[in-house]
Image: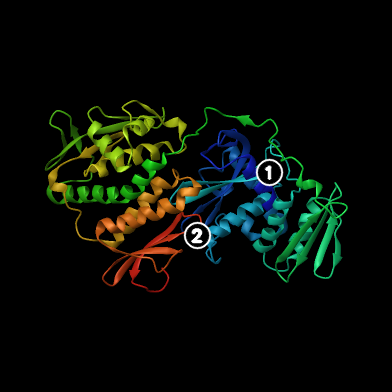
């Protein structure tokens, strides 16, 4: 499956992901393929099978997860029959979820796998079983990586996964001291040397001992895959993303401070305030806050538009992103025209990230009334209150939740670390890096907030505690 997934990722490159529950299918980088959800992973370290998930189990996209449950019932494998297996007994529960997807691919003989970051709180796992994706044929680099990784992923002797690879390619293995070898269909010879629990070497040679024929074979291609020009294809521009990473969590803090002010001084009773367009005020039972329109969006129709008169706020956004006039003209996200959100994967996240970031770089507070965004400019909201580490956890997780689905893999680590680091700096907390690469800390006195990262940069956990105390 490592070999198959390697081929799949080369044919269907990483990009914006969307899925159709009824078809069922997944679209990545404009390529649509038949696919099924097998499970989801949450920050608490649990995996939920699609057949047990209220959001998926009654839709066609969860059908193949039911096959896994049936297999578990026949073979007595509780991990396949428990609705929500707990992965916390693994050293890295999140990585265990990734490995579980590989196993699901193998059990269902799938052609590929897709992981979709739903938000900061969870990830969705899909297997691709579309015949448009070919079965992986041996190629020297790919098979070498696959044999090494396949043995490393499973505990115990490396011989078993090596035998599995030979069997998948219909190769009769020949055994020698610390080695297994066999001949591929084209006459190339594969020799695998083994340690106790690892593959120590892989050699591929041609029939006469020279260069292997599979090394010069052309790369495999998709067969009649559907290209979907109207599928989500646009990613959040990197210059704007860098600004959003610095601003989002602090914007959430500002909004929370506004709510607290309204509760303390304006008799806020939990009901949504009223917008007085003529007075330019957001009215609470005990008074109002000066505000102005910022923008609006329609998630169902798929559009976002800045409100008239917000050129000054958008200019601040452009300046924060270091964009010149010519560069800014190429970004529809900051123009006054209606922005087509259907070009993006997470539509609402795009609209909220744009509006929140713009409000914060302008030095104001973001709030919303339904699908209408407002920027609160009232000077009484200049402070953010005292440092509250529990609230900091909420702010950072909230900011990550909005941004996680907008970040491309290659910039995720940089972006999410910037989100945490910038928030700490804005609060005046010392940023400590003693836990790198696993976490960074915001420190005040004897206490800290730790932000933990997965190897791909995803924020997996945020928690307060004593400085340099036990793992949180």
Q: Earlier in the sequence, mark 2 or mark 1?
A: 2
Instruction: From the top left corner, tell me how far across and down residue 244 is, in percent.
Output: 35, 45
Left or right of residue 412: residue 468: left
Q: Which quadrant: the C terminus?
A: bottom left
Q: Residues within 10 Å of mark 2 (few under 14, many from 20)?
A: many
Question: Seen from this angle, which residue lies furthest top?
Answer: 337
Left or right of residue 50: residue 148: right
Secondary element under disc 1, as helix, strand or loop, is loop
In terms of image quadrants, where is residue 127? top right
Residue drawn where x is 76% and y is 55% of the image: 165
Instruction: From the top left corner, tell me how far across and down residue 290 is, in percent.
Output: 14, 38
Residue drawn where x is 83% and y is 70% of the image: 177
Q: Nearer the viewer, residue 282 or 377?
A: 377
Question: Seen from this angle, which residue lies furthest front?
Answer: 210
Q: Nearer the viewer, residue 398 or 338?
A: 338
Per the rendering, the mark at residue 45 is 2
């Amino acid at each position: 499956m490592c070999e198959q997934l390697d081929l799949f990722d080369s044919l269907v490159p990483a990009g914006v992901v969307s899925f159709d529950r009824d078809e069922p299918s997944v679209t990545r980088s404009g390529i649509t393929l038949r696919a099924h959800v097998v499970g989801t992973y949450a920050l608490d370290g649990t995996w939920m099978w699609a057949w047990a998930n209220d959001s998926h189990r009654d839709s066609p996209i969860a059908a193949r997860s039911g096959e896994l449950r049936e297999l578990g019932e026949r073979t007595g494998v509780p991990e396949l029959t428990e609705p929500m297996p707990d992965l916390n007994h693994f050293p890295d529960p999140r990585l265990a979820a990734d490995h579980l997807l590989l196993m699901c691919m193998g059990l269902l003989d799938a052609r590929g796998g897709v992981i979709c970051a739903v938000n900061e709180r969870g990830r969705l796992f899909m297997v691709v079983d579309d015949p448009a994706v070919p079965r992986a044929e041996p190629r020297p680099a790919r098979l070498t990586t696959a044999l090494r990784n396949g043995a490393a992923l499973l505990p115990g002797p490396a011989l078993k996964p090596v035998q599995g690879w030979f069997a998948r390619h219909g190769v009769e293995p020949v055994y020698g001291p610390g080695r297994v070898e066999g001949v591929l269909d084209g006459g190339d010879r594969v020799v695998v040397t083994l340690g106790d629990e690892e593959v120590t070497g892989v050699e591929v040679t041609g029939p006469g001992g020279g260069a292997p024929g599979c090394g010069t074979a052309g790369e495999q291609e998709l067969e009649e895959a559907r290209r979907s020009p109207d599928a989500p294809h646009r990613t959040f521009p990197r210059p704007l993303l860098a600004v959003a990473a610095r601003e989002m969590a602090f914007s959430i803090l500002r909004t929370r401070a506004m709510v607290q002010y309204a509760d303390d001084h304006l008799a806020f009773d939990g009901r949504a305030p009223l917008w007085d367009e003529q007075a330019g005020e957001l009215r609470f039972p005990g008074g109002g806050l000066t505000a102005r329109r910022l923008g609006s969006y329609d998630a169902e129709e798929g559009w976002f538009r800045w409100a008239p008169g917000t050129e000054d706020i958008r200019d601040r956004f452009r300046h924060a992103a270091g964009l010149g006039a010519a560069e800014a003209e190429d970004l529809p996200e900051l123009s006054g025209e209606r922005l087509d959100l259907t070009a993006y994967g997470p539509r609402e996240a795009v609209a909220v990230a744009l509006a929140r970031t713009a409000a914060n770089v302008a030095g104001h507070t973001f709030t919303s009334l339904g699908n209408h965004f407002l920027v609160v400019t009232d000077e009484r909201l200049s402070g953010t209150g005292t440092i509250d580490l529990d609230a900091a956890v909420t702010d950072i997780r909230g900011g990550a939740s909005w941004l996680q689905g907008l970040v491309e893999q290659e910039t995720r680590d940089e972006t999410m670390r910037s989100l945490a680091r910038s928030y700490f700096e804005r609060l005046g907390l010392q940023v400590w890096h003693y836990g790198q690469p696993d976490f960074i800390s915001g420190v005040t006195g004897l206490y800290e907030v730790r932000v933990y990262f997965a190897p791909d940069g995803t924020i997996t956990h945020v928690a307060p505690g004593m400085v340099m105390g036990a793992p949180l």
